[in-house]
Image: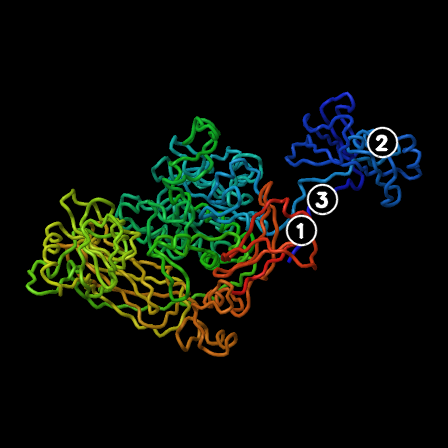
Amino acid sequence: MIGFRFIMVGVCTGATLCGFAQAPTAAFPTRYHFREPRDSYYRVETDRIPAPDTRREWVQAWPENGSAYSVEFGSRIGLQLKSGADVRELLRERPLTLSRVVGPQLFILQAPDAMTALIEAQRLAAKAEVLLSCPIQRRSQIQLHGHYSSKPNDPFFYDQWSLENRDANGASLGVDLNLRAAWPVTRGAGSVIAVADDGVDLTHPEFVHRATNDLHYYFDGLNGSTNALPADSNDNHSTEVAGLALAEGNNHRGMIGVAPQALLANWKIFLGWNAVASDEQMMDMFQYRSNVVSVENHSWGKAQDDPSQLAPTPLESIGISNALTFGRGGRGTVMVHSAGNGREGGMNANDDGYANDPRVICVASVRQRGRVATYSNPGACLLVAAPGGDDDMAIFTTDRPGSSGDNPLGFGDDFADRDYVFSTHVAGTSFSAPQISGLVALLLSANTNLTWRDVQQILILSARHYDLADPDVRTNGAGFRVSHNVGFGVPDAGQAVALAQRWINRPPLTTVAHTTNSVRSIPDSALRVLITGTNLSANLASILPLVPCIGPHADSPTALLPLVDLGLATNPITTNLAGRAALIRRGGNTFEQKVQVAAAAGAAFVVLYDNGDPKPGFGIDVEFGPIPCVFISQSDGVALRNYLPTDDTARAQIDLTPTTYSFEITNTLICEHVSVRVQTDHERRGDLRITLLSPAGTRSILQQVNLDDNRGPADWTYYSALHFGESSAGKWTVSISDEQPLNTGSVQFVALTLDGVAITDTDQDGLDDKWEETHFGSLASDPQIDSDGDGYCNAREQIMGTDPNAADIPYQLDLSPWDQGLARLSWAGATNRTYEILSGTNAVAPMKTVTNLPGRFPDTEWFASYTNFVNQFFRVQTVIP
């Protein structure tokens, strides 16, 4: 319960001299000048000056010193006199009365109104015996230092939906980073963000104060130089990236970055679209000034039209390792990398050795409502995501100033500032990564002792998923929601900074590795539709899919089920298909819509067949269909459709026959990253699917069927972050399947490596025995259970070092201004609870119910007009069913 009263007072104290200026009227002078150590003047807008016969208690004014904050002058005057001066003599025959004696020779005077007070204060300031004469003032520059930051005065903040995505009433419109909950604690001061790109235009007003240092460098492959400015007409990318990370805030201009008080290190490695740094220079770049630079942002990677695998060179790897091992005094420079934009071409972040590195924070992109962006590469190595823009909404950011950049002329009726850009051009994982880099800068500003591992785990613990309709979102064995599309989700900056403040460094890593040299052949075309029945022709018994389906996959064989012909499935199905599968013909609506129609009716899987239209490209998109699907040829589909009415005993199954390697792990670790190194002599890497199944049942998709025509993988290590928090103990299974015809090969070598924190874990549930005994008195607790109902499961509580039997955040209310008209009442909330808001004018008297709200984790909030809060107290309580 808290009380909130809008009571603001101000008084000039000490030897100050105030000044006031206003538009001329017959009754009032134009300019007021008061005595103080420095001269100050204020102006009143003409339409705000009261008429001579109007009695006003307060008059609003703006200082002439450039401050953006107004003051209000009242009808009282603060007056300080020299020793021996008589205040009664000064007030003789003046419209002032002595209201209060504050101290020796320090008084408060009362005038009939605010304008009279201004006139009299100036008159008194001219007296030789007066040290101070200033109207009492209340200042808008003084604001509550609450848990929620005031809205920035940057005029285009309302376009920065990635930082705050709300409607005019405060209601959430989808995904955002919740930055206003982090800024009261830190804005990144003390952190340095290096942007390795094509050169930031440091003349931009948003960077002038952020870039006054000697950290800039042009790694040009020859001798290098400190001039890292844009040099090519296409050198626009870096300026757009940098603005998202650290554009100056509250400067009444443009936008605000995630970490507006961090410093910028401008590293140039591109000229236009071409990389100019050699691998030797890239080595130097990765470790450049690593004891000064806090976080490196790398919004680049493997070409998005290149399906092959690309690893850092040995020299580059040395530079990366040195920065992570020795940077920041041994805590490690934190590296952030974009996931890449080749999703529609079947690209995967695990094939980019820069993003696939487990020591790097790999960042995906989401759309405004939280679904993964249409271009954002999937991958088991993804850690988190951030808004990156898409065809629904672009990202607002800085542009090269003047006539340069991507917005040289300015555009739009309500946006014509050519120093900024807000168009479909600005969309990509390039623009998600710098927002996470800015967030990392906030974390390191809040707690300089964090290692790169600590930072990663704080991001994981503070992340949440917005698109629970994505069938790839699963809960791992430790209770974390994970997906190959957005990793652990989008971090909440307020939660992340709060965690950083109280974080205890994680124990050192323990590594467990198992290898096998057992050579095994990979069965060709191992994904099949199997049909059983009587009088079945040989060609229908085992049907080879035509092209891959991009979406849920039958990594384990489905049940053998009756197959129901749904035709085109363009309309909802009323028949109950539970315990059955669906046969659907191409045409009339999208593949994904067909699968969703069948799933809504209860079907377990779908067999789609072609209709003779041009063959689909790389694969058919059923990514957000909730059940497995395969796509077969027109001839096979028609034959199957014609066969089904002849045999009611017919059954169908999607079957996959992979080559598998199992590893029994007896070590008990809390997993962090898991890797699988694979060597094959397969004739075409793009034919293969590689997965890893943990003892807890979480499956990491390390490689999907793709367009790479090269042999292999000849020797590649795939990393997964999706097993974070799970127990290492038990059977891990690597599966390698060939899902396309013609090319063949064998597995030569497989290695499984697990990194994590060693614990004593008798029941192998990922919870340390001593921790369980201390908190629960036995080993019977479940890592996925939220024992205290505070929104954090036991596995999370163990990692955070909090009490699983008590709420981690005190149940207290915060009331903060949200904008000029609304205030935000908030508290630590939990999902599946209902909260009652009560209000009254007396903290101890009975209060009346204002409204009931469903709970939302981690914060539940309520917005209302300021007028509802005057002289009000509030209580929030859980509604007991």
Q: Which residue is mark 2?
A: 124
Residue 763: % across, % down: 40, 77
Placement of 315 over or under 504, stated as above or below: above
Q: Secondary structure at mark 1?
A: strand
Amino acid under label 1? Gln
Ranked by sequence position, the earlier of labels 1 and 2 is 2
Amino acid under label 3? Met
Ranked by sequence position, the earlier of labels 3 and 1 is 3
Q: Nearer the viewer, residue 815 or 52?
A: 52
Q: Nearer the viewer, residue 89 or 826?
A: 826
Q: Assess disc 1: are there few (<14), some (14-19) or many (≥20) residues with their C-alpha within 10 Å of its C-alpha.
A: some
Ranked by sequence position, the earlier of labels 2 and 3 is 3
Residue 412: % across, % down: 44, 29
The quadrant of the rendering that contains the N terminus is: bottom right
* Image-based side of 564 in relation to 837, left or right: left
The residues tagged by marks 2 and 3 sit, at their Cα atoms, a distance apart of: 26 Å
Placement of 796 over or under 41, stated as above or below: below
* Image-based side of 645 in relation to 431, left or right: left
* Image-based side of 45 in relation to 792, left or right: right
| Numbered mark located on residue 872 in the image | 1
What residue is drawn where x is 24% and y is 45%?
589
Residue 61: % across, % down: 70, 32
Foreground disc of the pair 1, 2: 1
The residues tagged by marks 3 and 1 sit, at their Cα atoms, a distance apart of: 16 Å
Q: Assess disc 2: are there few (<14), some (14-19) or many (≥20) residues with their C-alpha within 10 Å of its C-alpha.
A: many
Foreground disc of the pair 3, 1: 1
Q: Which residue is mark 3?
A: 8
